[in-house]
Image (cartoon, helix red, strand yellow):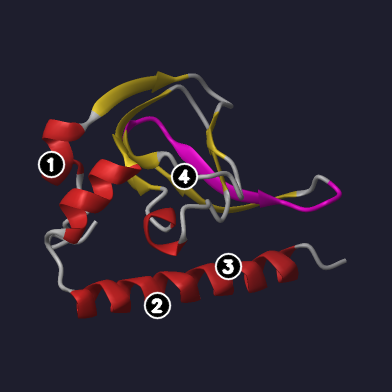
């Protein structure tokens, strides 16, 4: 993660709760309402989508960092599944607390740029998703 990124566990440390999650447990599911932001401390999490036929496409295997940040800006819905690939430890901050403390650090223009950027990421992930499941 870039050094100047403020979406770090350290920035939100006073507001975090800690979770131990077993292998093959959903952290969140596509289209579900976001409850907050997760920081992976130990273990690994697959970011993936499933086709209507049940086929899986894994976008990335995360070993550290932030999970579920896009819903903080796109209206509160997850754009993919996140499932633990092994027993994992995560930290969690609720969405309201995240928005309050993150948004206090950026101005309106910065928020608009971030929101637009993340909506474009979601759009391109849909394209990749469609291409991944072509027969």
Camera-near label (4 vs 1) is 4
Asked which secondary structure carries label 1, the reply is helix
Instruction: Report x, y in % for residue 24.
Output: 58, 27
Quarter of the rendering occupied by the N terminus: bottom left
Q: Distance between the residues labelled 3 and 1?
A: 28 Å
Quarter of the rendering occupied by the C terminus: bottom right
What residue is pinned by disc 1?
10
Asked which secondary structure carries label 4, the reply is loop
Which mark sits nearer the N-terminus, 3 or 4? 4
Which residue is located at x 11 percent, y 61 percent? 105
Q: Give, as a single range, the part of the protein colored magenta.
A: 41-53
Asked which secondary structure carries label 3, the reply is helix
Camera-near label (3 vs 4) is 4
Relative horizontal placement of residue 112, taking residue 23 as reference (left or right): left
Camera-near label (2 vs 1) is 2
Which residue is located at x 15 percent, y 73 percent? 107
Instruction: Report x, y in % for residue 102.
Output: 19, 55
Against 85, residue 127 (above or below) is below
Q: How far apart are marks 2 and 3 (CA)?
A: 14 Å
What residue is pinned by disc 3?
125
Which mark sits nearer the N-terminus, 2 or 1? 1
Q: Distance between the residues labelled 2 and 1?
A: 26 Å
Asked if residue 64 can be seen in this view, the reply is no
Disc 3 crowd, CA 10 A, few/some/many (<14, 14-19, 20+): some
Q: Which mark is residue 116?
A: 2
Relative horizontal placement of residue 36, taking residue 49 as reference (left or right): left
Residues 14 and 22: in front is 14
Asked if residue 92 can be seen in this view, the reply is yes
Q: How far apart are marks 3 and 4 (CA)?
A: 18 Å
């Amino acid at each position: 993660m870039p050094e100047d990124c403020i979406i770090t566990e350290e920035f939100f440390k006073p507001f975090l709760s800690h979770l131990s999650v077993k292998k093959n447990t959903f952290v969140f599911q596509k289209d579900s309402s976001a409850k907050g932001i997760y920081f992976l401390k130990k273990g690994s999490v697959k970011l993936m989508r499933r086709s209507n036929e049940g086929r899986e496409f894994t976008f990335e295997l995360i070993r550290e960092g932030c999970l579920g940040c896009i819903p903080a800006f796109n209206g509160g819905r997850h754009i993919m599944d996140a499932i633990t690939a092994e027993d994992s430890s995560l930290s969690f901050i609720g969405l309201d607390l995240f928005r309050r403390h993150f948004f206090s650090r950026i101005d309106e223009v910065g928020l608009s740029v971030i929101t637009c950027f993340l909506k474009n990421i979601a759009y391109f992930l849909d394209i990749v998703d469609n291409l991944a499941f072509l027969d």
